[in-house]
Amino acid sequence: MSDTKQSIQTNHIEYSMVIILCLVIFIIVSPLVYKTIYNMSKMSAETSTQGVIEYVKSLYTNENLKYEVGLPFKIKFTKDSLIAYEKDNEITLNTINEVTLKGKKPISGTVTIDENGNVDIKDLDFGYYKCEKNTNDKINCYK
């Protein structure tokens, strides 16, 4: 009987040590996993922003195939659509070729092509991240 009690106590100690070891491993690994997920989602927002820049450039080029469109050319994204502006006047896009956005569509924000052809991004919102870019800066995404 005493052997059984002793083996049960030994088993409890062994199980407790395994649980403690698992917790220590979890405590060490969890920040690394969180950082990896954070970096991946931030890089995803940056990549989507680059796709939006190319999309707006394509819209501008496509619009110029049919009509002469002046600069600055701005696209304002809303949850359900987008609004185009030429020299701060709202215009209707009449693209000849279909232009599709590769990547995630922003919920809100603006992309502007200025008179020098530089792209300016303000508050491009992808849900968890907002991205900005001034004329010659790199894309900056933040929560």
Image (cartoon, rainbow, N blue to C red):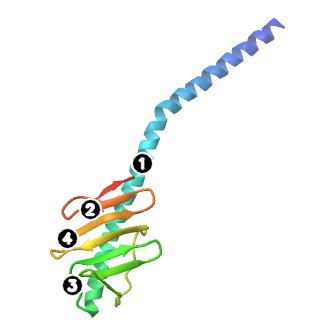
Q: Amino acid at mark 3?
A: Gly
Residue at the disc numbered 4: 118
Q: Nearer the viewer, mark 1 or mark 2?
A: 2
| Mark 4 closeness class: few <14, some 14–19, many ≥20 residues within 10 Å | few
Number of other residues with Cα within 10 Å of mark 3, as a class: few under 14, some 14 to 19, many 20 or more:
few
Q: Are marks 4 and 1 in contact (CB under 8 Å)?
A: no
1 or 3: tag closer to the N-terminus: 1
46 with respect to 19 (left or right): left
Q: Which residue is mark 1?
A: 38
Separation (CA) of disc 4 from disc 1:
29 Å
The residues bearing labels 2 and 4 have C-alpha atoms spaced at a distance of 10 Å
Is label 3 in a helix, a strand or a loop? loop
- Residue lying at 28% horizontally and 93% vertically, measured from the top left: 66
- The answer to whether marks 4 and 3 mark residues whose Cβ atoms lie closer than 8 Å is no
Image depth: mark 1 or mark 3 in front: 3
x, y (%) of residue 90? 32, 84
Q: Earlier in the sequence, mark 1 or mark 2?
A: 1
Cα distance between the residues tagged 4 and 3:
14 Å
Q: Marks 2/3: CA distance?
A: 22 Å
- Circle 2/circle 3 CB separation < 8 Å: no
Is 39 displayed left or right of 63 in the figure? right
Q: Quadrant of residue 114?
A: bottom left
Q: Disc 4 marks which amino acid?
A: Asn
Exactly how many numbered labels are in the figure? Answer: 4
Query: What x and y, as percent, mark residue 45?
Result: 38, 59
SS for dot 2: strand
Q: Disc 3 marks which residue?
A: 70
Please tell me the numbered disc located at residue 101. none
- Please determine whether, in this image, residue 62 is positioned above or below residue 139: below
Outermost residue, front direction? Answer: 89
Location of residue 50 by image quarter: bottom left
